[in-house]
Amino acid sequence: MDMNKDGLPEEAKPEPIFDEAITRAMEGKLTEEQEQIIKKYDKEASTRTLKSSIGSQLFYWFCFAVTVYHFVTAYFGGPVVLKHRSLHVGMMLVLGFVMYPFGKKSGNNKITWFDWVLIALAAVAPLYMWLDYLGVVERAGRPGAADVWVASILVILVLEAARRATGWALPILSTVFILYGVTGPRGFINVSLPMFGHRGYTWAQLSNHFFANTEGIYGTSVDVAASYIYLFILFGAVMGKCGMGVFFTDLAMALAGHTKGGPAKVSVVASSLLGTINGSAVANVVTTGVFTIPLMKKSGYSKEFAGAVEASSSVGGQILPPVMGAAAFIMAEVLGIPYSRIIVHAAIPALLYFLGIFIQVQLRAGKLNLIGLPREQLPKIGPVMRDKGHLLIPITLLVYLLLFTSWTVLLAAVTSIITTVVISFFKKSTRMSVKDLCDAFAEAARSMASVAIACACVGIVVGSISKTGFGINMADTIISLGQKSLMFTLVFTMITCMVLGLGVPSIPAYIITATIGASALAKLGIPGISAHMFAFYYAMFANLTPPVALAVFAATAISGGDPIKTSLASMKLAIAGFIVPFMFVYSPQLLLIDTSFMDGVRVAIGACVGVFMLAVAVEGYLFTKLHWAMRLVAVAGALCLIDSGFVTDLVGSVILAALITVQHLLSKKEAVV
């Protein structure tokens, strides 16, 4: 034993918790293995690396130019709608065919001749639209031969680009809807369908519908992608370049690392904050999970629970205001309401979701007698805020502009991006160089490609639905199957969204489900925002549900846990997210619809207490372990409190008081024994 200078034994120094790999990960430096995890589980990140230095430089500056175009048009306004959207889709198709190879073994380091052909064809539709815009508009509904050829090329390119960028599910679904559109007595396929039948359309009619108006490929989803989504992806890229990711990590460590179950709480805080600047749940898992998951395992959490905490927290970043998942911008556009209202409506459900995870993490730590990380090895809140705290100014400004001024979302986003660049010069550690800014612009274009391509492809589905009336027929069928029961209709809508989410990215899953399911819910008298938020939530949570749970699989690649067990643990942690959508349909006050400030506060407090009881029931622990009967009682009390009625709040409060009393007495009894 070592002795100090007085001959007394020295105190044992705590074992370092941050090894080299964890430290590098906290600094945002991913290893090659970690980058491979992202590419394996996130199809959108599986891009080719150009071997030619000249080719890579040309592509870099093309990406930069694409972002400059979108940034300038967002502020000053762009060309007429169809010209702007056709150019946007054309540029995104070029990016897609350069970034994503034909297959796993096809030209991963270079652009093949086949890719060059597709890149050239990607310019056909925008050139045709720009050169003969008035003709295209005037001939809408009566297309000429050239119109049909151009539309056909566009559809084929969009399907192929979507296959490369997102996988097979979305293009197959789009193809099914194309076949549905041309099937009918007057259609290309002269067959009468036994269910959901319609008159049928020729290929010329259907393809022209996709190309020559704003109800097909150049529809609302592409409009939102070319404006709101692009700007907020750029905002995230700029924030990342000035060290926001590292700041969020250090802040989470300083705030929660020392508390009971600290590493898991760090995961919740860091992943939720990173979700405001990162649009991908899988990328979020890998970015924060490479250090939070090893820390959770070191502190005593199981491999499955560690992976589940990271996966559920990262997915939750998509529902957290002010910068939510890309689908939230589409929701605002479809509903015709300001994005600021979406933020307000989403606030309490997002709070309940993360509160549920946080409480379960705390209870699990209590059950396992886990402790926090040593304070002396953690960042201090003072130095962290002094070093990078000024980076919160652009986010605060964005929230202010969105909620308390009449500024448009686009103007608020542009102003926040410019402010971020200026603010970065306040400290040397965050200062951006010209190269950093150019890198952020180029990175935004690369990140945008897969999102824009998915939005264009889902336009085929939406276009087929609007042309054939499938949405109305399907809504009537859902209501009929549910026997006009709101609960059954909600369940059918949830199942539809979850099934779509098994293989389709969250944005198309939301758009398709909202197109069909929201109509059914609207016919039952549900407010539009409630119906769309319902679809939005389940589209996001498909990343957690087996058998295709990409965020979970990425987490298990780091944790080494069992994928199915981790997925089930993720669903338990996210239980509030699965229940709350049903509750805000029945109790719109949870979305702050037609609710006064004081009622909103009352609803929020009651719902928070309800989520606390729900977490206790799921975890089976409060001060000591809960009997299964007490867990059922806790679930009943939780549902009463999440519902916003006076009577239900009273019943839930009585159950809560009884539960706490019984648990306190049992814990004292166990302590005596």
Image: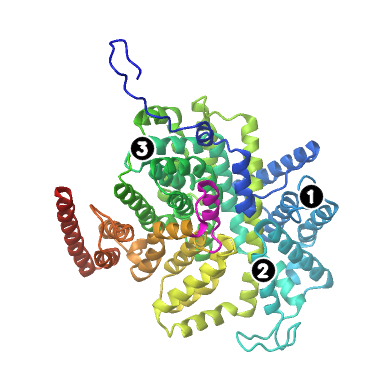
Magenta stretch holds residue 67: no
Give the magenta part as a residue range: 547-564
The amino acid beneath tag 3 is Leu
Image mark for residue 107: 1
Disc 2 crowd rating (10 Å Cα; few below 14, some 14-19, many 20+) is many
* Residue found 79% across the figure and 60% down from its top: 128
Disc 1 crowd rating (10 Å Cα; few below 14, some 14-19, many 20+) is some
* Residue found 59% across the figure and 46% down from its top: 75
Secondary structure at numbered mark 2: helix
Q: Up-down: is 371 above or below 136?
A: above
Q: Would you say 329 lies left or right of 103 here?
A: left
Which quarter shows the N terminus? Answer: top left
Q: Would you say 200 lies left or right of 355 here?
A: right
- Residue 226 visible at all: no
Number of marks drawn: 3
Image quadrant of residue 104? bottom right
Front: mark 1 or 3? 1
Magenta stretch holds residue 555: yes
Using the image as rendered, state which of residue 188 and residue 641 is in the foreground: 641
Residue 631 location (% of width, % of height): 27, 64
Image mark for residue 460: 2
Secondary structure at numbered mark 3: helix
The amino acid beneath tag 1 is Gly
The residue wearing badge 3 is 255
* Residue found 69% across the figure and 74% down from its top: 178
Precedes in sequence: disc 1 or disc 3: 1
Precedes in sequence: disc 2 or disc 1: 1
Residue 317 location (% of width, % of height): 47, 51
Find the distance from the CA under tag 1 to the CA under tag 3: 47 Å
Disc 3 crowd rating (10 Å Cα; few below 14, some 14-19, many 20+) is some
